[in-house]
Amino acid sequence: MSRIGMGFDVHRLVPGRDLWLGGVKIEHDKGLLGHSDADVAIHALCDALLGAACLRDIGHHFPDSDPRYKGIDSRVLLRHVTQLLRQHGYRLGNCDITICAEQPKVNPHVPAMQEQLAQCLECEVSQVSIKATTTERLGFTGRGEGIAAYAVALIEEMNALS
Ligand code: MG
């Protein structure tokens, strides 16, 4: 049987922080603010995967009140989620992420992000789709105040006969 999940996340853009998106460090005059490295794309993806397996959400597994996760590389969290799904008998079918950002340009970094996420997920690059869009200068993403990400993921039972 296949199961679907969705995830959504937002982080504020502020000066003086590195910008991590999809497991890739991008040169920009601002970075995302958060307890971890605030990689909004990975957080949305983790929530999609956890949701598909009915395993709560990223805040449940990695609470931002826990000092262990302060400044943590979100790729570590994604690897943890990947193992969690495996322990519950699931493997990834495919996932699809949309990143909403006015600045910086995300598209040139998409292949590197796919590579990074596929490594964490222990899957093929073709199973990890990443798309980028602006919001036509509308809303908080359009004003450059933050970046939003949406993700969906399909997972499959590993022991399924069909
Ligand atoms: Mg987050």
Image (cartoon, rainbow, N blue to C red):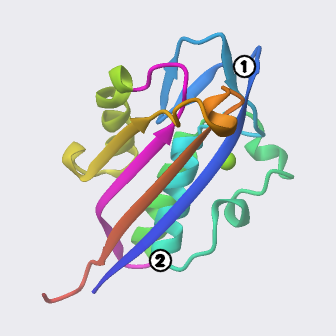
Instruction: Check disc 1 and give the amino acid type.
Output: Arg
Image label count: 2
Q: What x and y, as percent, mark residue 26?
A: 51, 18
Residue 73: image location, x then y, percent: 60, 35
> Given the image, on which type of amino acid does mark 2 rest?
Ala
Residue at image coords 41%, 36%: 132
Going by the image, does 62 lie left or right of 125? right
Left or right: 16 in relation to 78: right
Q: What is the C-alpha distance between the residues marked 2 and 1? A: 33 Å
Q: Can residue 72 be seen from the camera position used here?
A: no
User: Which disc, if any, is residue 53?
Assistant: 2
Q: Which residues are magenta?
A: 88-106
**Label 1 sits on residue:** 17
Q: Position of residue 152 (x, y in %)?
A: 41, 61
Whether residue 49 is situated above or below residue 111 in the rendered picture: below
102 in magenta = yes
Which residue sits at x=43%, y=36%? 133
As helix, strand or loop, the secondary structure at mark 2 comes to loop
Of 158 and 10, nearer the camera is 10
